[in-house]
Image (spheres, rainbow, N blue to C red):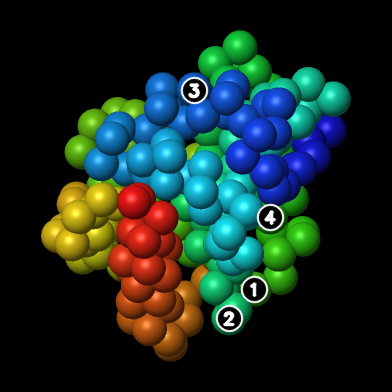
């Protein structure tokens, strides 16, 4: 069974292991500066950085944002030794059962086999491609970073507004924690 435990302090004993997984799992252009992330943990109420635990053992990391009308699912990663236990699927099921609003996430376009597998994983778990012309802002500078797709739990007439909110809050406003 999977549980998510929110990390609320930068000195949480599991945080260093989770940050190691974060760096291993995401290329630099798709993740925050670690100092920035540590400063955001206690200061940004909308951001939920969670330890994923599977049967009491640390299994991975999930980061999502409560954006009011919707949720932005920023990162999901499972430790290599914990893979193939359907932990990612269980996290998505937990999100869908416990976070009742539309959920949006960014995903690489299917330009390689791993990206195709990831998209198919999200599709099998109830998400669909909603936008193919999205450009992720850079985490560190005021410029565009990379072309991604937006997937979500359901289409929504305010999708363009939701995407702008992700870009403004999770990227641009969060830069103030870079120092």
**Residue found 43% across the figure and 87% down from its top:** 157
- SS at circle 3: helix
Image x and y of residue 15, in percent: 62, 30
Res 168 → quadrant: bottom left
Whether residue 135 is situated above or below residue 30 in the rendered picture: below
Of residue 49 and residue 52, the one placed in the foreground of this image is: 49
- The image quarter containing residue 153 is bottom right
Marks 1/3 in contact by CB < 8 Å: the verdict is: no
Q: How far separated are the C-alphas under marks 4 and 1? A: 10 Å
**Nearer the observer, 16 or 138:** 16
Q: CA distance from mark 4 to mark 2?
A: 15 Å
Per the image, the residue denoted by label 4 is 95
Looking at the image, tell me whether mark 1 or mark 2 is earlier in sequence order: 2
**Side of 95 relative to 146 (left or right):** right
Answer whether labels 1 and 2 touch (C-beta < 8 Å): yes
Q: Badge 2 is on which residue?
A: 69
Identify the mark nearer the N-term, 1 or 3: 3
Query: What residue is disc 3 on?
Result: 20
At x 68%, y 27%, the residue is 14
């Amino acid at each position: 069974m999977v549980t998510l435990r929110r990390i609320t302090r930068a000195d949480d004993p599991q945080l260093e292991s989770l940050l190691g997984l974060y760096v291993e799992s995401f290329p630099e252009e798709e993740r925050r500066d670690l100092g920035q992330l540590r400063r955001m943990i206690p200061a940004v109420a909308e951001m939920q950085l969670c330890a994923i635990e599977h049967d009491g053992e640390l299994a991975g990391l999930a980061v999502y944002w409560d954006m009011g009308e919707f949720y932005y699912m920023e990162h999901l990663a499972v430790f290599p030794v914990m893979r193939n236990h359907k932990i990612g699927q269980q996290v998505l099921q937990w999100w869908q059962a416990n976070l009742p609003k539309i959920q949006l996430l960014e995903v690489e376009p299917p330009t390689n086999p791993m990206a195709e597998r990831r998209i198919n994983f999200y599709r099998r778990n109830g998400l669909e491609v909603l936008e193919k012309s999205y450009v992720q802002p850079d985490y560190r500078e005021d410029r565009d970073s990379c072309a991604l797709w937006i997937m979500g739990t359901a289409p929504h007439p305010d999708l363009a507004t939701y995407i702008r909110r992700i870009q403004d809050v999770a990227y641009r406003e969060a830069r103030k924690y870079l120092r």
